[in-house]
Image (tube, rainbow, N blue to C red):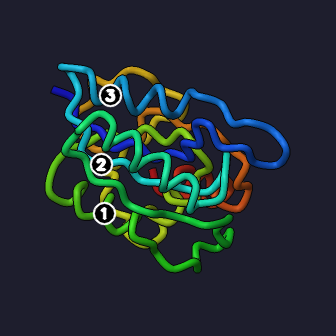
Amino acid sequence: MIKLIIDSDVALGVHHENRPRDIDDGFAIVEAINSDAIELKAVTTVFGNGPLAEVDRVARELIALKEADVSVHSGATGAMASDGSTPPNEAVVAMARILKSERCHIAAIGPLSNIGLLIAHYPGVLGNDVDWLETDVDFASNRITYLTGFSDDGARRFVEDIVTSVY
């Protein structure tokens, strides 16, 4: 069974910046819950498709609607500092706790602020192999399996710099 954390800016049904937001993140969460091959360990939220309060609300509503026993942890409200000095948030602490106790994959399908903060504050939890835009989930250690949503340029640069220099 694949153990998975979804880090998302899910905003299914939210109108933000004068347009309704898409369904892809919501679909990913529901499919992970429905899958017999996936154990969804947590959903962590990040700003992006909507303000964090709306993203949190949508994530919690999806989990409740599916009557799933999955925790939701609130993450970054905005872009992180490119030097990694932004303090960790609830989502980052939860991801680190899970990753310290068991091997797990992260599907990062929103801005990379939480992932950048995870690497900045808990550099050892991802192991030594991070695959960018990789969809194969047959891995031996903790790694990021899918990254998209590069709207947080500070986090993207920070993550790329760390991956290039450390991993």
Which tag, 3 or 1, sits closer to the chain's start? 3
Q: Which mark is residue 94?
A: 1
Nearer the observer, 109 or 147: 109
| x then y, percent, for residue 150 | 69, 44
In this view, 36 is above or below 39: above
Mark 3 secondary-structure assignment: helix
| Quadrant of the frame with the N terminus | top left
What amino acid is found at the position of numbered circle 3 in the picture? Ala
| x then y, percent, for residue 79 | 68, 64
Residue carrying label 3: 32
Which tag, 3 or 2, sits closer to the chain's start? 3
Report, in whole angstroms, how far the alpha carbon at label 1 lies from the one at label 2.
8 Å
Q: Quadrant of residue 91?
A: bottom left
| x then y, percent, for residue 141 | 24, 40
Mark 2 secondary-structure assignment: strand
Q: Which mark is residue 125?
A: none
Whether label 1 touches label 2, CB < 8 Å? yes
How crowded pointer 3 is (Cα within 10 Å; few <14, some 14-19, many 20+) is rated as some
**Is residue 55 toward the left or the right of residue 18 in the image?**
left
Report, in whole angstroms, how far the alpha carbon at label 3 lies from the one at label 2.
11 Å
Q: Quadrant of residue 11?
A: top right
How crowded pointer 2 is (Cα within 10 Å; few <14, some 14-19, many 20+) is rated as many
Q: Which mark is residue 42?
A: 2
